[in-house]
Each structure stands twice: as structure tokens, then as C-alpha cells.
Image (cartoon, rainbow, N blue to C red):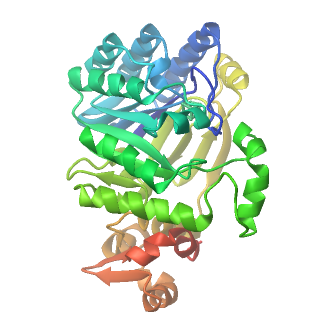
């Protein structure tokens, strides 16, 4: 089982961000940390027999939380839950929010993997995104992390930034590769309703949807070319693609995220955190004041509790598992559902295989490179 803890605080909200995060004042940060610890204590007896195999502290910007609050949260986590000694333990951090003391403190609590949100090495693009850092600040953070003894680092980069060109993406990748991180995530910018970006680029989004030429945003074709370029450069540089958006040096794949795609149960704590266990998907409330109120009154801050039918579980097995380059194993499907994969999905698998989008080999089924290019379309077939 895996453990996720959400820290919803950021120094400033980025223009494109629709994550549950915000720039709250110190009083709220302290109250939230107390509530989060209380939530851990609520769940501790329920999971007392479980040894967690991975921990992921995400956000928001966990590295921006006051060190003494983070120290208390991590101490409480160890007090409440049993973490395997070899567990992968990741914390997200953002450039310009980290100090050497903070890094030493989290390392002392077992954090052994950092995920740093760079997004771009081009200062103009960073400004467009509304990020608080420039590339030099990122370099400083990265150097500090290495000096503090972190030898498993992910760097997040982004494609589809307004104004991004193939040249600027290549420069970003070259700058990142020079640092030799163990892992690189490369996600396309998604413009979500309710964000300043949505307002700013609304007309362009409509043009994009209608297949008309765009002014600021890349067209679908250009976006795809940027993704292919990133994939090519990364694989030429020794980073194997193990998931649609994730690349790693051998042995440095993110086990926590692989767990999500392999339907390993997880407990999520904190604002808006999602959990998956006993074939139920739970989601915590996303209003920070209600979250704290519920916990103070001794109630679990769960907003939704959805049982997963056998049908849905099989569909999840396929569309999550096929995101991984290694795909799904026929034997795993049989072990999970006591049913042959062909009996359930034989027709779809045959059709997608004939179209050159899926391939079967050595008991596994996976997307072909062409299938990966239109993965959303292919994976929808299993829903
Ligand atoms: S740092 Fe991340 S979580 Fe925070 S506002 Fe920016 S994108 Fe959102």
C-alpha cells in the first residue's frame, strides 16, 4: 500500500494552475498542519497492520511549508504509520522555496527522492506561466539538493507553453540533461476552466478546438511535434520512456506513480487527497476551512466514497496499466479477476492490434509507439 500526503500551500498561484493549492497565511498553514496530523491519528488504527511501500508528499509546494511544521508532520507520519525501511519517499519542491536546513531535515525523516518543478529553462516562458522562479534559481535549488545528498531527483518540464518553440524546448532539455537528473517528467500544459490562463487564452482554445490557426497556443499538430521532439531527445540521452509522460534512467522509475497505474491501493491524507482501497475510491473535501472543521469535530474529511464495480475495476486495470510502456500482463489480469483477459476484452484487443495500436508479446499487452501517440483515444476503448 502507498501513502500520499497533500500540502496545499504555494508562495503564489501560477497562472495555469488548477490544483488544490493557494497562498494562505501562516496561521492557516499552522492550523492545517495540526488538522493533517489529527487526520493521520484518525487513520492510524485502521492501517496499523500495513507497511507502506512508498510515500509521496505532494502539493502545492511542500518545500514552502515552515520547516518546523513539516518536521512535525513527518514525525507524526512515522509515529502513526509503519513505512518499509526501503520505501521510496518522494517530496515535491519548487525552486526558490528550499533551504539546505530544510533538505537536511526532510532527509533525516527518510525523504530520498525529490521532484522539482522546473517546467522550462527559458525565463520568458517561466514568466508566462506565472512561476516564481527563473532558471538560475532552479539551478541553485538543484545544486543544493545534490549537495544535501539527494541522488534520486526528478525534474518536471512542460510542453505546449504559449510561445514555446522547438528550439526553446530543445534548449530546456539540453539544460536539464546537462544536470543528469535520474528522472524527467514531461507533461503537456492543460488549460483548465477557472484559471487565469483560461480567460487569457479562451479565444485561442476555441480556435484550437475548431482546428483553426491559433495565435498564442500551439496547434494540436505542433503540440504533438513538441512531445515527439522531447521523447526523441530524452531517449537519445539514455532516459527510457516507461510511461506516456515519464522518462527515467534505468532503476529510477517512480515506484509511487507506477503503483497508481498498477492499481496498488493507497491512502491519501490532506486537503482533496484521493484514496483507493477495498475497491473504493475516496476523495477528501477540497475546501480548506471545511476540511479543518470536520477534523476538529472528529469526523473524517471525506467528500465522496465511490465503490468500484468489477466492471470498472477491469476497465481501470486496462487503461491505467496500458499507460506504462511495459503494459499489462495477462496473468495479472487473470489473478485479479479470475477471468481470462481475452474473454473480457478479446474483441477490442484484436481490433486495436489489427490497427497497429496494440501488440502482445510474452504474456503482456502494450501500446505500440503509434498507440502511445494517440493513447487517449486507444485507452478510451476500454472504458
Ligand atoms: S507551484 Fe504548482 S501547485 Fe503551486 S501554484 Fe504553481 S503549479 Fe500550482
Name the quadrant where ligand 1 sits: top right
Q: Nearer the viewer, residue 281 or 372?
A: 372
User: 382 above or below 273?
Assistant: below
User: 123 above or below 72?
Assistant: below
Counting the numbered discs, the total is: 0
Percent x, y of residue 305: 65, 46
Res. 351 in view: yes
**Which residue corresponds to the image point at 21% horizontal and 33% vertical from the top-left?**
151
Quarter that holds the C terminus = bottom right
In the shown orientation, is residue 316 left or right of residue 272?
Answer: left
In the shown orientation, is residue 360 left or right of residue 300?
Answer: left
Percent x, y of residue 96: 44, 20
In the shown orientation, is residue 44 left or right of residue 208?
Answer: left
- Name the residue furthest front: 167
**Which residue corresponds to the image point at 28% horizontal and 44% vertical from the top-left?**
177
**Which residue corresponds to the image point at 39% horizontal and 19% vertical from the top-left?**
74
Q: Nearer the viewer, residue 31 or 300?
A: 31
The image quarter containing residue 68 is top left
The image quarter containing residue 210 is bottom right
Quarter that holds the N terminus = top left
**Which residue corresponds to the image point at 39% horizontal and 44% vertical from the top-left?**
172
In the shown orientation, is residue 283 left or right of residue 244?
Answer: right
Percent x, y of residue 323: 43, 64
Percent x, y of residue 164: 53, 49
Res. 243 in view: no
Amino acid at each position: 500500500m502507498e501513502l500520499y500526503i497533500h500540502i496545499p500551500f504555494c508562495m503564489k498561484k501560477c497562472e495555469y494552475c488548477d490544483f488544490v493549492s493557494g497562498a494562505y497565511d501562516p496561521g492557516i498553514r499552522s492550523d492545517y498542519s495540526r488538522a493533517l496530523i489529527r487526520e493521520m491519528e484518525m487513520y492510524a488504527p485502521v492501517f496499523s497492520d500495513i507497511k507502506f511501500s512508498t510515500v509521496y508528499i505532494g502539493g502545492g509546494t511542500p518545500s514552502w511549508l515552515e520547516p518546523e511544521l513539516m518536521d512535525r508532520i513527518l514525525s507524526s507520519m512515522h509515529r502513526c504509520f509503519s513505512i518499509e525501511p526501503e520505501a521510496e519517499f518522494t517530496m515535491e519542491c519548487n525552486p526558490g522555496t528550499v533551504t539546505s536546513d530544510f533538505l537536511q531535515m526532510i532527509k533525516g525523516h527518510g525523504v530520498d527522492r525529490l521532484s522539482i518543478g522546473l517546467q522550462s529553462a527559458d525565463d520568458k516562458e517561466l514568466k508566462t506561466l506565472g512561476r516564481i522562479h527563473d532558471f538560475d534559481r532552479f539551478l541553485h535549488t538543484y545544486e543544493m539538493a545534490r549537495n544535501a545528498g539527494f541522488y534520486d531527483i526528478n525534474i518536471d518540464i512542460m510542453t505546449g507553453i504559449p510561445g514555446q518553440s522547438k528550439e526553446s524546448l530543445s534548449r530546456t532539455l539540453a539544460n536539464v540533461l546537462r544536470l543528469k537528473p535520474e528522472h524527467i517528467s514531461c507533461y503537456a500544459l492543460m488549460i483548465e476552466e477557472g484559471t487565469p490562463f483560461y480567460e487569457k487564452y479562451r479565444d485561442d482554445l476555441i480556435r484550437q478546438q475548431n482546428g483553426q490557426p491559433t495565435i498564442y497556443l500551439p496547434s494540436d499538430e505542433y503540440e504533438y511535434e513538441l512531445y515527439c521532439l522531447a521523447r526523441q531527445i530524452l531517449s537519445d540521452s539514455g532516459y527510457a520512456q516507461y510511461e506516456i509522460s515519464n522518462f527515467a534512467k534505468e532503476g529510477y522509475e517512480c515506484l509511487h506513480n507506477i503503483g497508481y497505474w498498477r492499481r496498488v491501493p493507497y491512502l491519501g491524507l490532506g486537503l482533496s487527497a484521493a484514496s483507493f482501497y477495498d475497491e473504493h475510491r475516496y476523495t477528501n473535501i477540497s475546501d480548506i476551512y471545511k476540511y479543518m472543521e470536520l477534523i476538529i469535530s472528529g469526523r473524517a474529511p471525506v467528500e465522496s466514497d465511490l465503490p468500484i464495480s468489477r466492471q470498472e475495476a477491469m476497465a481501470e486495470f486496462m487503461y491505467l496499466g496500458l499507460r506504462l510502456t511495459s503494459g499489462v500482463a495477462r496473468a495479472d489480469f487473470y489473478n485479479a479477476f479470475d477471468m481470462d483477459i481475452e474473454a473480457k476484452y478479446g474483441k477490442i484487443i484484436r481490433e486495436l492490434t489489427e490497427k497497429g495500436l496494440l501488440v502482445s508479446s510474452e504474456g503482456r499487452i502494450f501500446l505500440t509507439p503509434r498507440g502511445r501517440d494517440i493513447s487517449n483515444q486507444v485507452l478510451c476503448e476500454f472504458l
